[in-house]
Image (cartoon, rainbow, N blue to C red):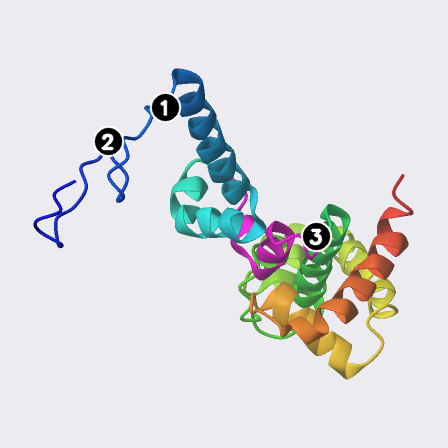
């Protein structure tokens, strides 16, 4: 170490006191590399990191044919380990049932961003008249009756206006809800899952 110049920097092979550093062995270098790799792997498994990866590469993943539900607020809560897989299925089924009911019984097209809702809605203008002209109105009415009964079953577990607003906001409109409502959301989804899917094993 250069003691004449107090600002001099010790060379890489020496400590600041001037003592020579002992070179690391290959075993030590390999162990340090394994530690760095393990830390990187743990960071990539963190829910927040996982969701960031999904969000950043969403358009590319959709072009590859992956499910767009991954990008919904429900998918985000699943990535963050707030919701279970069964609860996510219940949320998507709520959107599907709402879409079928809206197709048959709500005038006009509802502006809902949910992919599940849009797949189930698939309504067309003058749909009733077309079925009358084609002689398929009986089958159309049968599907409408089924959609109405499913929606009535669904609403048993969405008992009040506040609960309905929470479900519509996250499941249909694809908007995040405050974390203070996560507990209510999970309870509603658990009840829906039991109603329509039975008790999972």
Residue found at the very far top of the displayed protein: 26
Q: Is residue 181 above or below residue 54?
A: below
Confirm whether the magenta stretch covers residue 79.
yes
| Residue of label 1 | 24
Q: Distance between the residues labelled 3 and 2?
A: 56 Å
Which residue is drawn at the image coordinates 45% and 47% (left, top)?
Answer: 53
Q: Nearer the viewer, mark 3 or mark 2?
A: 2
Q: Distance between the residues labelled 1 and 2?
A: 11 Å
Q: In which quarter of the image is the N terminus?
A: top left
Tell me where residue 146 appears, x and y as whole percent: 82, 57
* Image spot of residue 118 (x, y percent): 57, 57
Label 3, label 1: how far apart the Cα atoms are: 51 Å
What span is in magenta?
Answer: 66-83
Residue 37 seen in the current view: yes
Name the secondary structure under disc 2: loop
Mark 1 Cα-neighbour bin, 10 Å: few <14, some 14–19, many ≥20 = few
Q: Quadrant of residue 156?
A: bottom right
Sequence-first tag of 1 and 2: 2
Q: Is mark 3 on a helix, strand or loop?
A: helix
Please name the residue that numbered disc 2 is placed on.
Answer: 13
Q: Earlier in the sequence, mark 3 or mark 1?
A: 1
Q: Where is residue 154 in the image (x, y as percent from the top left)?
A: 82, 64
Q: Is the magenta stretch mostly helix, strand or loop?
A: helix
């Amino acid at each position: 170490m250069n003691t004449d110049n107090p600002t001099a920097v010790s060379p890489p092979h020496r400590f600041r006191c001037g003592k020579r550093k002992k070179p690391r062995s290959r075993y030590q270098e390999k162990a340090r590399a394994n530690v760095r790799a393990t830390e990187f792997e743990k960071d990539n498994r963190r829910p927040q990191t996982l969701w960031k990866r999904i969000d950043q590469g969403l358009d590319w993943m959709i072009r590859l044919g992956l499910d767009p539900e991954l990008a919904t607020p429900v998918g985000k809560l699943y990535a963050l380990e707030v919701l279970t897989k069964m609860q996510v299925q219940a949320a998507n089924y709520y959107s599907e049932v709402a879409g079928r009911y809206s197709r048959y019984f709500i005038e006009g097209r509802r502006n809902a961003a949910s992919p599940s809702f849009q797949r189930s809605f698939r309504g067309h203008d003058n749909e009733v008249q077309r079925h009358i002209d084609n002689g398929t109105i009986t089958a159309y009415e049968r599907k409408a009756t089924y959609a109405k009964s499913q929606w009535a079953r669904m609403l048993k577990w969405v008992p009040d206006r506040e609960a309905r607003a929470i479900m519509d906001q996250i499941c249909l409109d694809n908007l995040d809800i405050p974390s203070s409502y996560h507990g209510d959301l999970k309870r509603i989804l658990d009840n829906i899952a039991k109603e329509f899917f039975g008790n999972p094993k």
